[in-house]
């Protein structure tokens, strides 16, 4: 079903319209929320709740507009709020296992050769942990940029951070990922 | 590696972490909405006033909510309470009400016409925090198209003011003493839309205001007046966001709700 038809049907109270939107956007949204929250159950809860919110507010949604940017803002907003609350009570300063400790060491010294820090088979976990070690707002910026293709100015507005900070965050994240991934891809 | 390769790398990593084939939210979303609709039918409300519930919790919450609903609807005190909770805008019974005509105001020679109270001086948020008796919410950013002017204090009521290049205004008002109510602020009932601000109930008047035209001794509801108002209560604080003039060109209704959701106590 076409997205605009799905939205029209949802506005008329037809839940089949919402089912189409759920099926289309649930995976990307859960992945995005997971990258901010690092908890699959919470990520699914956030996205589930976001779809319910979207359905409840669909009358506020203008005809002809794409659904994805509007919906992704709800997901990122809710995930970021929850992550901020969690980050107040959970310290990331003391990684609980060996690979996290290695990663913390690497983050403290970006010149360290990543190959010394990780083995290829651990690459996935290391990449995820590298992002997890960033503050929630920086993780959200990565999600907004690389999952939802938002403009820098929009990310700046959303996070309440200056444009220069957003640019630095994304460049920093890109460089860190590059340092982790390039050696793996080259080997 | 460049910006184009990062999304695919992240997608691969996350696909391994949470395979697409394992993500199926539709049954839970549908359950939440159907559970909400049941409650909607019992309350006689619209779809957008429903509270969502997690699929893991309704077994406990639904009977509790229904029990509370029965108690509320069965007692006069409960009915008054429910009405106060749900209605943030006082409904006007008519689209007009009598007022004193400009021409009826007697002015002695040498005296000036009475005018409305001038706006309080603009101060910084830090100054306002030191003076008011509650923690007020602020936006963590200046919305696109607006310039932040500052805070005005009216007694213990806080008003944050933003302005557009076209002299439109975005005003965020917060009060411990309830919403400012006067006949001018009433709204014909069919102009009030129930909305959700996060999990909180709110009410939106997308456009319109009572106005008094020169020479007339009645105030008339003008549905085309460029004034948008959103009201809700957060932690006992009465919250109102109002858009005046061309401000709505920079903020649509969904953006306004999002703005309200982003209000938070700033350090």
Image (spheres, coloured by chain):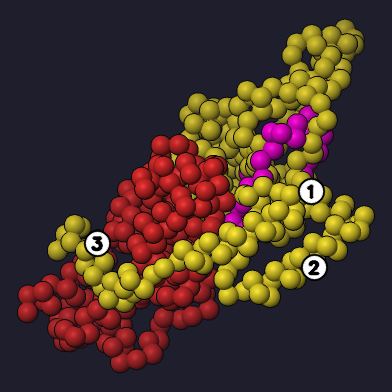
| Residue B28 coordinates in the image, percent (x, y) | 51, 67
Q: Nearer the viewer, mark 3 or mark 2?
A: 2
**Which of the two labelled residues, at mark 2 and mark 1, occupies the earlier sequence position?**
2
* 10 Å crowding of disc 1: few (<14), some (14-19), many (20+): some
Colour representing chain A: red
Q: Quick check: can you spot residue B168?
A: yes
In which chain is the residue bearing label 3? B
Q: Dot 3 corresponds to which residue?
A: B7
Residue B197 versus residue B169 in the image, above or below = below
Query: Which quadrant holds residue A184?
Result: bottom left
Q: Is residue B245 left or right of residue B180?
A: left
Q: Which residue is mark 2?
A: B67
Contact, CB < 8 Å: mark 2 with mark 1? no
Work out whether residue A30 or residue B110 is closer to the camera in this orientation and state it. A30
Q: Position of residue B96 (x, y in %)?
A: 80, 22
Specify whether residue B198 is painted magenta.
yes
């Amino acid at each position: 079903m076409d997205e605009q038809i799905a939205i029209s049907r949802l506005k008329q109270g037809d839940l089949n319209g919402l089912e189409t939107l759920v099926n289309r956007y649930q995976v990307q949204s859960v992945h995005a929320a997971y990258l901010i929250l690092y908890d699959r159950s919470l990520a699914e809860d956030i996205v589930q709740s976001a779809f319910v919110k979207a359905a409840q507010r669909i009358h506020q949604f203008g005809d002809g507009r794409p659904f994805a940017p509007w919906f992704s803002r709800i997901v990122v907003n809710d995930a970021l709020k929850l992550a901020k609350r969690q980050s107040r009570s959970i310290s990331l300063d003391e990684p609980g296992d060996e690979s996290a400790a290695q990663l913390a060491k690497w983050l403290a010294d970006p010149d360290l050769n990543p190959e010394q820090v990780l083995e290829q088979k651990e690459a996935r976990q290391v990449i995820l942990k590298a992002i997890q070690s960033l503050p929630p707002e920086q993780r959200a910026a990565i999600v907004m940029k690389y999952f939802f293709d938002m403009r820098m100015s929009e990310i700046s507005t959303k996070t309440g951070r200056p444009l220069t900070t957003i640019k630095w965050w994304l460049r920093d994240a890109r460089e860190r990922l590059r340092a982790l991934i390039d050696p793996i891809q080259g080997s | 590696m460049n910006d184009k390769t990062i999304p695919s790398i992240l997608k691969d990593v996350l696909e391994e972490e949470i395979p697409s084939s394992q993500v199926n939210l539709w049954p839970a979303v549908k359950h939440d909405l159907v559970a909400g609709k049941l409650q909607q039918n019992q309350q006689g409300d619209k779809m957008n006033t429903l509270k969502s519930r997690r699929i893991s919790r309704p077994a406990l919450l639904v009977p509790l909510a229904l029990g509370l609903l029965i108690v509320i609807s069965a007692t006069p005190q409960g009915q008054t309470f429910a009405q106060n909770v749900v209605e943030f805008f006082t409904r006007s019974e008519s689209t007009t009400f009598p007022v004193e005509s400009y021409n009826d105001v007697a002015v002695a020679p040498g005296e000036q016409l009475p005018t409305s109270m001038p706006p309080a001086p603009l101060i910084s948020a830090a100054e306002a925090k030191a003076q008011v008796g509650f923690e007020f919410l602020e936006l963590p950013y200046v919305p696109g198209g607006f310039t932040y002017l500052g805070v005005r204090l009216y007694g213990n009521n806080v008003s944050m003011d933003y302005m557009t290049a076209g002299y439109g205004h975005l005003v965020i008002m917060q009060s411990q003493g309830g919403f400012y109510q006067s006949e001018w602020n009433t709204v014909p009932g069919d102009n009030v839309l129930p909305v959700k601000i996060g999990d909180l109930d709110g009410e939106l008047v997308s456009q319109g205001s009572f106005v008094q035209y020169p020479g007339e001794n009645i105030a008339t509801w003008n549905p085309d007046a460029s004034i948008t108002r959103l009201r809700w209560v957060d932690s006992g604080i009465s919250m109102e966001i109002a858009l005046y003039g061309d401000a709505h060109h920079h903020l649509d209704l969904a953006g306004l709700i999002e703005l309200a959701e982003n209000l938070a106590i700033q350090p």
